[in-house]
Structures are given as C-alpha cells and as structure tokens.
Image (cartoon, grey):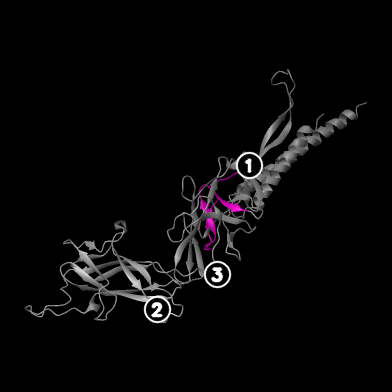
C-alpha cells in the first residue's frame, strides 16, 4: 500500500491554506496583489509502458501565481498618496541601490525632501526644468524637493501684457483750436503697473502709461513726470493689429525693452537690468481701455508649502512666494510578463528573467495607466472568495487525511492476517 497520494494531497492542501491565509492577512494592504496555488498531478511513468496503465501518485503545487488585476481606488485626501489606474508600477531605488517596483503609492517626504516609501526606498522620476516644464534627462532619478532651504529668488526677465487701447481716443496733446476744442488727455488715463524683481528678489513696481500720438500710434512712458521721455512706441495697422515695436530676432514677436533700476536704497549696488515686455496680445479697437493679463516671470525666495501630483505624473510644488511650478515627473515601469516578477516583501517586486526587463515611461503614455493623487489602490483580495476557498481547502485536507487513515487500516488488516 502507498501513502504517497494522501501525503502529497495533505502537503498541497496545506500550501493552499498558506496562500489563502497570506491573502486574507493582506486584505487591507495597500497595492497588494492576491496569489493562488495552482496544482498539477503526479504520475509515475516507465520507459516503454503503454499509455493509460500508470496510476497517479498524487499532486504537487505547480505554481503560486500572482493576480495583477486592478484593485479598488479609495480617496484619502493626502496629496502624497498616489494610485495607478491601469497598467504600470512605481519605480523605486532601494537603500542598497537596486531597483524595485510597487503598486503601493502611500509615499512620504523624509527630512532631506526625498519622496520615499515606508521601507525607505526612494521613488524615481524624471527631472523637470521648472522654467520650461520640459524633461531634462531621459533616465529616471530619485525625486527630491527643497524642504531644507527656500528656493532662490529669480530676476524678472519678461513681462507678458495683454490689453486693449481705445481706438476712439484723440491725440493726448488735444487740440484747443478745434471746434469744439479737444482737451489734452492726462498721461495717467491709460496706464497699468506690475511688480518686477531684481536678482535678490526685491520687488519694484513698474508702471506703463500709453499716450495717443498720431494715427494708430501710442507713445509708452514709465513715469508720470512731464519731463520724462517715451521709452517706446506702439503702432497699429488700420485693423487695429499691432505692427511695432518688432522684436529682435523677429521670431520673438513684439517686445519693448525696459531698463529697470533696483529699488532704492540699493545697499548692495545691484546693477540695472533689462526686462522685455511681450506685447503680442495688445490690440487697438473701439472699446474702453482694459487690461486682461499682466504677468512676469520673477519672484522672491520662497519655502515649500505643498506638493500635488497630477494625472500625468507631473509633480507640482507650491511655495510661500506664490510660485507653483513643476519639479519632476513620476516614472512608471511595465513588464512583458508581470506574473514573472518576484515578490520581495514591503509591497515590492523585482524583475526576473521570466518577467523581462522593465520598460519605463510616464503616466498616460502608451499603455501606462494614469495617476490619481490623493488616493490609494486597495488590495485586490476578494475576502468573501478567500473564505470560501479556505473552507474548500480545509475539506480537501480532511479528505486526504482520510485516505491515509484508510490506507493505514488496510495495511493493519494485512499485517494481522494469520
């Protein structure tokens, strides 16, 4: 008599219970992916034996496969919590320098401003030029933000203006000889102002005043002093479209250069600097003077006050000086065979020969899923199904134990034959 079948069945059922218990234990683990035990029969074969004449000798666990179906996404409100809705894994750099991958997006900021997991692995992303928003390198690096020191001040280089000048306005000088006489228009009638910043972040208000001077022509002043000379001139065609001043090079559109003297007192003797006023959206039409946009690219120094991650993985940071800018973009990775990944604990997987090498990209690109900030992907364990599976595995264990008991009774009967 053979106890092999029953013993293998006990081992397989025990392994199945281990897998089910592991799933149940991690039913509340963020980003956890359930596993299942897959069985295969054992058959004793002999060279030259005819098919169908060999008895099975039991069962074995063929594989414990992971199920990478999407888990539910729950809203947390924490801006550093991130869920992947779709394909992909977050890329991590572990403390030993090796790469790992996870679906758990419950990230933190450490004392150095690095984005890390609970186990200390650093989240990888692409460096972004905060000025242009363009990626500066093709390879991912650990994401890090300036939490220990403020971002430095930035000198203003450009002011972007969008406004309309009233085409019905008479020449500013007026015409006393006309009937009826036309009074002079005060320079302050058409004007606006904005703060610009020097290289040390000190603000200075800059005013621009527009004075009609001939057909479709406006002189630009930066002072109300009657003795001040014009700093430039705007010209329009008969359709009210701006024709000058043309920028150099012409591809830059229409620009008016302003020379800015740092705000007095100037104890550090900072030099004058030039600000280009971008005028492409300036028009002249028959409606009242109005300014629809006036912005500049400088700022004073500021401390980090908040972080938000957008659906495309772009990490937007907010600073106490009012600046919001992109500081990085979260990197994702995908694999040819996700079930070939090897789980190493701490909600992490590492690539293997079976999984293939990681293909990296950004959220929403190609087959990568989008991100959901302020949310986490829950475990994909179906707790009800696991409890049913546990009862089934228990019955299988009991049945296999019964086959061993029966074999033992038969063996005892044979031994006791006289």
| x then y, percent, for residue 79 | 52, 62
> Which of the two labelled residues, at mark 3 and mark 2, occupies the earlier sequence position?
3
Q: Quadrant of the N terminus?
A: top right
| Residue carrying label 3 | 149
> Which of the two labelled residues, at mark 1 and mark 3, occupies the earlier sequence position?
3
Query: Which residue sits furthest right?
Result: 418
Q: What are the residue bounds of the magenta stretch?
A: 64-93
Between residue 189 and residue 204, name the one nearer to us: 204
117 sits left or right of 259 in the view? right
Q: Are marks 3 and 2 in contact (CB under 8 Å)?
A: no
The 10 Å Cα crowd at callout 3, few under 14, some 14 to 19, many 20 or more, is few
| x then y, percent, for residue 356 | 59, 40
SS at mark 3? loop
| x then y, percent, for residue 97 | 64, 52
394 sits left or right of 365 in the view? right
Q: Are marks 1 and 3 in contact (CB under 8 Å)?
A: no
The 10 Å Cα crowd at callout 1, few under 14, some 14 to 19, many 20 or more, is some
Q: Is residue 33 above or below residue 174?
A: above
Q: Is residue 398 above or below residue 219?
A: above
112 sits left or right of 21 in the view? left
| Residue carrying label 2 | 263
| Residue carrying label 1 | 352
């Amino acid at each position: 008599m053979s106890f092999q079948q029953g013993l293998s069945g006990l081992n397989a059922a025990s392994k199945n219970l281990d897998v089910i218990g592991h799933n149940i234990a991690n039913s509340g683990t963020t980003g956890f992916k359930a596993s299942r035990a897959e069985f295969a029969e054992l058959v004793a074969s002999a060279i030259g034996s005819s098919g169908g004449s060999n008895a099975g000798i039991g069962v074995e666990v063929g594989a414990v496969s992971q199920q990478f179906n999407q888990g539910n996404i729950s809203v947390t409100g924490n801006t550093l919590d991130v869920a992947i809705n779709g394909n992909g894994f977050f890329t991590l750099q572990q403390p030993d320098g090796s790469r790992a991958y996870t679906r758990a997006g419950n990230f933190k900021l450490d004392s150095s401003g690095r984005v890390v997991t609970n186990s200390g692995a650093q989240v990888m992303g692409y460096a972004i030029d905060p000025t242009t928003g363009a990626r500066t390198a093709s390879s991912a690096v650990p994401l890090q933000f300036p939490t220990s020191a403020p971002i430095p001040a930035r000198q203003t280089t450009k002011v972007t203006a969008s406004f309309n000048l009233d085409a019905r306005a008479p020449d500013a000088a007026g015409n006393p000889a006309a009937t009826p006489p036309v009074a002079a228009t005060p320079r302050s009638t058409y004007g606006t102002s904005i703060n610009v910043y020097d290289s040390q972040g000190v603000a200075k208000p800059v005013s621009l005043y527009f004075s009609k001077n001939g057909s479709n022509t406006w002189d630009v002043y930066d002072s109300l002093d009657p003795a001040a000379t014009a700093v430039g001139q705007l010209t329009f065609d008969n359709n009210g479209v701006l024709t000058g001043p043309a920028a150099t090079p012409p591809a830059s559109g229409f620009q008016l250069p302003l020379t800015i003297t740092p705000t007095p007192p100037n104890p550090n003797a900072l030099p004058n600097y030039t600000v280009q006023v971008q005028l492409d959206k300036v028009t002249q039409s028959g409606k009242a003077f109005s300014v629809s946009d006036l912005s500049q690219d400088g700022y004073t120094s500021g401390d980090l006050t908040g972080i938000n991650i957008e659906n495309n993985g772009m990490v937007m940071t907010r600073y106490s000086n009012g600046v919001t800018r992109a500081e990085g973009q979260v990197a994702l990775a995908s694999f040819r065979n996700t079930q070939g990944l090897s789980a190493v604990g701490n909600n992490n997987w590492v690539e293997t020969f079976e999984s293939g090498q990681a293909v990296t990209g950004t959220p929403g690109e190609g087959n990568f899923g989008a991100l959901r900030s302020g949310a986490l992907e829950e475990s994909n364990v179906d707790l009800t199904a696991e409890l049913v599976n546990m009862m089934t595995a228990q019955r299988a264990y009991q049945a296999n134990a019964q086959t061993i008991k029966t074999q033992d009774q038969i063996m005892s009967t044979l031994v006791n034959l006289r």
